[in-house]
Every structure is written in structure tokens, then in C-alpha cells.
Amino acid sequence: MTHPFLDLAPLSAARFAEIEDRVARLLDTRQDVVIMQGEALLPLEGAIRGTAGPGNTALNVITGPYGQTFGNWLRDCGATVIDLSVPFHTAVTAEQVREAFAEHPEIDFVSLVHAEAATGNTNPVAEIGEVVREHGALFYLDAVASIGAEPVLPDAWGVDLCVIGAQKAMGGPAGVSAVSVSSRAWARMAANPRAPRRSYLSLLDWKERWVDGGRKALLHAPAQLEMLALEACVERIETVGLEAVMGRHRAAAEAARAGAPGVGLEPYVYEAREAAPVATTLRAPSGVVASELVARALERDPALPLAAGGGALAKEMIRVNHYGIDARVEVVEACLAALGGALAVVGG
Ligand SMILES: *Cc1c(COP(=O)(O)O)cnc(C)c1O
């Protein structure tokens, strides 16, 4: 009575290291890639707590809900935080980041979300990376929603801490994640007396006991199911080709933006170049509550990847989550048709 999910042999250290190398190739990086046994919030929090402390001044770019979370962690670490918030219908510009450095030359850490699945925008990381590098600050990037949907190139962009998760455009599991760490970031952590040590949040533990030891012995039992699922989803991307996977996401996003006006809805993000390929957000017409419209659309087909915006955005934002297996034009068309039908009822 064997079961496909059960009775698995333990995952060896060699296999674990091989999966890390595959993820490194996906990111086209020569930095150390550390896979972490938890949802992406684990390395996102671990990387901030490892590198930020009372002596630091952090520029925290807020283009969606995750930026707010990062700012709270940074403050909790004792860093001085300068928030740069932009409206969710747009992206931040490299010029805005440049201005922030001009006003606060003491900035030595920049946190940025690449693409925001929750608000549908994407930020110009390459251009921002140039500005960050000119000023020598450490560059932290949340690429959970961009990896697989658009290029993510930590080395080319000068990203010191690049966090990814498999559960969005990679079409993989939510229970493991990875972070690429530059030598500068390792040095900052080693010098930080408050960096987590002997802790589940600790990246330094992995550096000292795994990376520096030649990746021979794991710190604890690996989550086999998640690791196998991560390996399978990276393998699938390699087989199909990363370009093709990104192309599917781009085509789905273009279909969503192009088709929305036909059913009486407008894209939430004004400019197409600032719209994320991973998910498209739409604006509910005035007098229509987005969450009610989405609920009505889901009554027609509960399997559609539709959601309302989170928190206060539930009134005005509709999310079409066309990622992973849903990154297909047919799925987008079905979502728009259901929203159009619902609008005919709700919108009167
Ligand atoms: C989805 C996502 C995460 C992961 O968080 P969840 O709460 O599991 O969805 C982190 N950052 C960004 C930008 C995301 O889109």
C-alpha cells in the first residue's frame, strides 16, 4: 500500500544541493542560493532581520501590501526607515529612488518588491539597481511574484538578497522558498550582532553549517514533498523553456488589459509597462463594490482565478490571478466573461 506522497526516502544532502544549483541557474546567479523550508515570508523576514539593525537607514519602497510588512520588520530591527510610497496604480521610478538618496545620503539598505501580485504593478528593478549600486547600499528584492513571469536577474541588477517562492508563476509548491545572497550581504549579516543565530529565521546558520561546510550535512530533515515539488516545477520550466513560460504570462496579461474594456472594466494600473505579467488588476466601476462583483462572478464558476483586492482595496480592485497553470488566454477570457456577466446584474 504505497502512496505517492508517503513512504518517501529521506532527501539526501546531495539532492538538496542539486536543487539549489538548479534554482541558481533559473536566477542566472553565481551568488549562494539557500533554499528555506517555509513559505517565502521565511526568507523575506530572515534576510531583513539578518542585515538590518539600529545603525542602518533603510529606504523602503511601498507599491503594495508587502512593502508595508517589510517596513514594520525593519523598524522592529531598530533601523531608521524612510518609506517611499507610490499609488498602487503605478510603479516607482528610478528617479524617485535617486531623489530619496539625494535627500538622505545615509541610506544603506533598499527594500523593494519586484512585481506585486496583490496590486498588479511591476517595478523597474534594473534601473533602480543602478541607483542603489552608485550609492553602495544593500539591495533587497522580493521577486516571489515575478520569478517565472518576467526576467529576474539578481547578478545583472546588483541585487544582494533576492527572495523567490515557487507558488506563483513557477506553478510550484508554496511550502519552500529560496534566497540568493551576495558576499556583501553575508558580510553585513556576519557583522550584525542582532542577526538571528541558532534560529529558524537564521540565514547565517545555513552559511556557517551548510554553505561553508561544502553542503555535506543538512541542518535538519528536509521537507521532502516540497523539495521534490520544487525540483519538479523547475524541471518543467527547464523543459518548456523559461522564455515560453514568461511568454504565457505576458500573453495572459495582455489579453486581460485588452479585453477588460469590452466587458465594462478598466485596468487598475494605468500604464501597460507598469502592469505585472503575473496578475492583472481591474478597477470596479463607480457604484459597484469589487468584492461583490467577484463573488457574483465566482458563483458562475468557482474555479476561476479571481479575487477582490485585500483590505480597503476590496471595494475597488478586482484581481485576475493568471499565473502558473492559469497563465492562459482562455482562462483570462473566461474570467472576463464571468465578470461581464456579473456586472450586468450587479451594475444594474
Ligand atoms: C505571493 C507573494 C508573497 C508570498 O506571500 P503569500 O502570503 O504566501 O501570498 C510574497 N511577496 C509577494 C510580492 C507576493 O506576491
Image (cartoon, grey):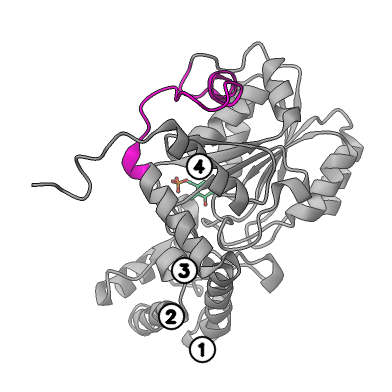
Say above or below: 301 vs 51: below
| Closer mark to the observer between disc 4 and disc 1 | 4
Q: Regarding mark 2 in the picture, which secondary structure is present there?
A: helix
Three-letter residue code for mark 2: Leu
Q: Residue 342: which quarter of the image?
A: bottom left
Kindly check if marks 4 and 1 are in contact, taking CB atoms under 8 A apart as contact. no
Kindly check if marks 3 and 1 are in contact, taking CB atoms under 8 A apart as contact. no
Q: Residue 52 or 216: which is nearer the viewer?
A: 216
| Res. 336 mark | 2
Q: CA distance from mark 4 to mark 2?
A: 41 Å
Q: CA distance from mark 4 to mark 1?
A: 48 Å
Q: Regarding mark 1 in the picture, which secondary structure is present there?
A: helix
Image coordinates for residue 303, horizontal then vertical, percent: 29, 69
Q: Split into 4 quadrants, where in the image is the C terminus?
A: bottom left
Say above or below: 67 vs 255: above
Image coordinates for residue 48, horizontal then vertical, percent: 62, 29
Residue 201 is covered by the magenta coloring: yes
Three-letter residue code for mark 4: Glu
Residue 96 is covered by the magenta coloring: no
Say above or below: 153 vs 267: above
Residue bearing mark 3: 322
